[in-house]
Image (tube, rainbow, N blue to C red):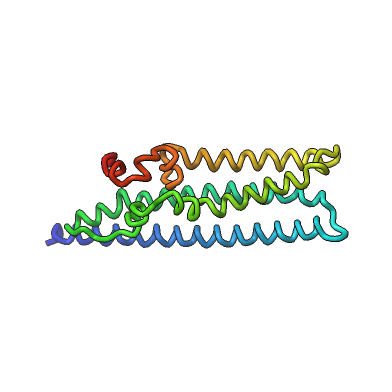
Amino acid sequence: MENELLPEKAIDAALHEFDALRSLMAVRFQMLTGLLAGALTAVGIIAGLALGQHGNKHLLLLIPPVASSVAIIHTEQRRRINLQGRYIRDRLWPYVQERVNADLPSWENYCEEKAGLLLVVYGEGQSLGLLLLVSVVALAAGGKVGTNGDYELLFGMGVFLTVAATGFAVLSAVHRDSDTRAGRLIRHPIASLHPRYRARRK
């Protein structure tokens, strides 16, 4: 009798893990939303102080370190969210389907099937792209004052962090263990854009 209950207990354990992972993903999304809102608010305040009637354009050099640092955190958190989604889609949900002997619907699989280039750019790139764009624009606007000897260090820090954030985002997308749809489009464009080739790769 005890052995007959084991499959049911295994399914319960898998569903508990599913709930825990989805909750953790929701927390990460909330954190990213708050972080992005805080960063854009800070950028707006700094830009207002720098470009006001009696503003100091040197303040623009504070924007790249702020925006790029948030971009790096954003990239890492999105990577973890995507890895959790990959585990649910490729390991956990197939395990549940096998145990209940039914082809259950999956939101993760649905998103994977409907993924396209426009969805990737809008869904995964908009926040990160906005942060990096803000950083580049601030560097360009503050370039003249940034070459002044008193502010060269701050300008150089902004350039370094912007380049580092961009490189980290690209590496995170194209890494072989990455599950971002952007990464799959870069690594396997035909397999990602055409379901026929994607199914052939499975």
Q: Residue at x 37, y 56 (%)?
A: 111
Observer-nearest of 123 and 96 = 123
Tell me where residue 184 appears, x and y as whole percent: 41, 42
Q: Is residue 2 left or right of residue 138?
A: left
Tell me where residue 169 appears, x and y as whole percent: 54, 43
Quick check: 128 above or below 189? below
Indicate the quadrant where residue 106 lies. Answer: bottom left
Tell me where residue 63 appears, x and y as whole percent: 72, 51
Q: Is residue 29 left or right of residue 14?
A: right
Quick check: 30 above or below 90? below
Q: Is residue 30 left or right of residue 106?
A: right
Observer-nearest of 155 and 96 = 155
Q: Is residue 52 visible?
A: yes
The residue lying furthest to the right in this view is 54
Observer-nearest of 19 and 35 = 35
Q: Residue at x 71, y 60 (%)?
A: 44
Quick check: 31 above or below 146? below
Quick check: 57 above or below 16? above
